[in-house]
Image (tube, coloured by chain):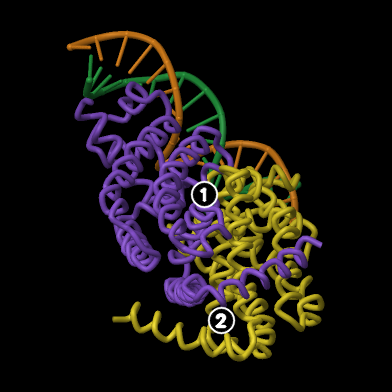
Chain colours: A yellow, B purple, C green, D orange
Amino acid sequence: MTDTRTKLLAATTESLRHDGIAGLSARGVAARAGVNQALVFYHFGSVGELVQAAVRTSVDASVGSYRARFDEIGSLAELLTVGRELHERERALGNVAVMAQLMAGAQQDLTLAEAARYAMARWNDQIEDVVRRVLGDNPLGDLVDPGRLAQAISAVFIGLELYDGVDPVGSSAAIEALETLVAMLQVAAELGPVSSRALRAKLRQVSARAAG
Amino acid sequence: MTDTRTKLLAATTESLRHDGIAGLSARGVAARAGVNQALVFYHFGSVGELVQAAVRTSVDASVGSYRARFDEIGSLAELLTVGRELHERERALGNVAVMAQLMAGAQQDLTLAEAARYAMARWNDQIEDVVRRVLGDNPLGDLVDPGRLAQAISAVFIGLELYDGVDPVGSSAAIEALETLVAMLQVAAELGPVSSRALRAKLRQVSARAAG
DNA sequence: GTCTATACACCGATAGAC
DNA sequence: GTCTATCGGTGTATAGAC
């Protein structure tokens, strides 16, 4: 990998974070990389492909950096702790903001959509692994599908990030509400076998009611 | 309100939905409205102010259209039913997509951020009202703040919408996972007083553990 | 209030010298 | 692999005729 390529890739995520998908351009990225504008097209063909390459590189590095930490997780409580750390860290690095901008642009651009699908899949695979492991030990773990839960978690993070840029106070409030709900779920998940059976029975009622 | 103004406002949300924030322009909106491009600046001053006016008009109409329906809600189960209907309907109309694009653009544009804050506040106020009413009747209703919960709900909707545009199957899966979790919370909320006290006690442990 | 015309900046992308 | 120069197109915004 040449130096110019890496500089352009780094400048692309930087620009996505700073200028948003609406303000991203080959000229802007090249300037940020300290590189000639024509090199974007020489190395990547088009702006869309540049973004795609940058996002793949970025998400591979990010997800990979959590692998060891994720492998150590053995309990639901631990998962929640690491999850909070991850969210805080990725947000501070601006990686969640990059994902959010990518997702917004992906609604109208097929190349960006492909990049977004790749990035989401990488995160989801990683999250799904640990969720499945932790939920396997839990008596109520069979009630929710790990893959689906992983996708829900990703979607929630994206929504929170966009909200945060518009109203940081409201975003914190939303996170607190979600933390409370998660704590309630955690309690439900850690109930003894008697309460657990009661909850399971009740849940059948609710599900039947919702379906009917 | 002149005809040209209304045509431009309608064309703006339409363009936001169809072209996204990155593809929105005065020329594009004017063409969609069947109106001269210079009229955007005559009537609204700038593209940003046009978007702001369009979003305010759109969200006022949308939120207002649910007022009567929301006032009739009396129970948690009813709230969930209406909530699903609302999400489905607003999504089908493209209003959630418009909000998502607005939020994405708002990360870098102060005028758009103001519009986004206004729109979110209108939705949150409406949701908070009914959540507070329903939670008031519930023995565990004091555990979660209605305002915060309303903001969390809004954030989740935005995230799901963006995910849906990238991976509709994954988005449905995420919604199913969230529905399961909501059902579990509903069960917990409808437990009898004995289990309810047990849950409350457990919750204090969890909160203390999370804080410490 | 609406139109044409236009100034000026920026965009993606390419050709061709080096 | 990198550079300059350039094409054609689009963007915001304004001036001025009607």
Residue at 49% of width from left, 65% of height from top? B163
Asked where in the image residue B74 lies, by quadrant, the reply is bottom left
Query: In the rendered image, which quarter is residue A197 located in?
Result: bottom right
Front-most of residues B82 and B186: B186
Tell me the CA gap for discs 1 and 2: 30 Å
In this view, B118 is above or below A160: above
Q: Position of residue A41 (x, y in %)?
A: 61, 55
With respect to residue B122, does A154 lie above or below? below
Q: Nearer the viewer, mark 1 or mark 2?
A: 1
Dots 1 and 2 on the same chain: no
Residue A53 screen position, x and y as percent: 64, 64
Of residues A40 and A49, the one drawn nearer to the viewer in this rendering: A49
Residue B185 image position (x, y, % from top left): 51, 72
Q: Amino acid at mark 2?
A: Gly
**Could you tell me if residue A129 is visible in this image?**
yes
Q: Check whether the beta carbons of the residues at disc 1 and disc 2 lie within 8 A of each other.
A: no
The residue carrying mark 1 is B147
Q: Secondary structure at mark 2?
A: helix
Which residue position holds label 2?
A: A147
Q: Secondary structure at mark 1?
A: helix
- Residue drawn where x is 33% and y is 65% of the image: B78
Q: Is residue A46 visible?
A: no
Q: Amino acid at mark 1?
A: Gly
Q: Quadrant of the N terminus of chain B?
A: top left
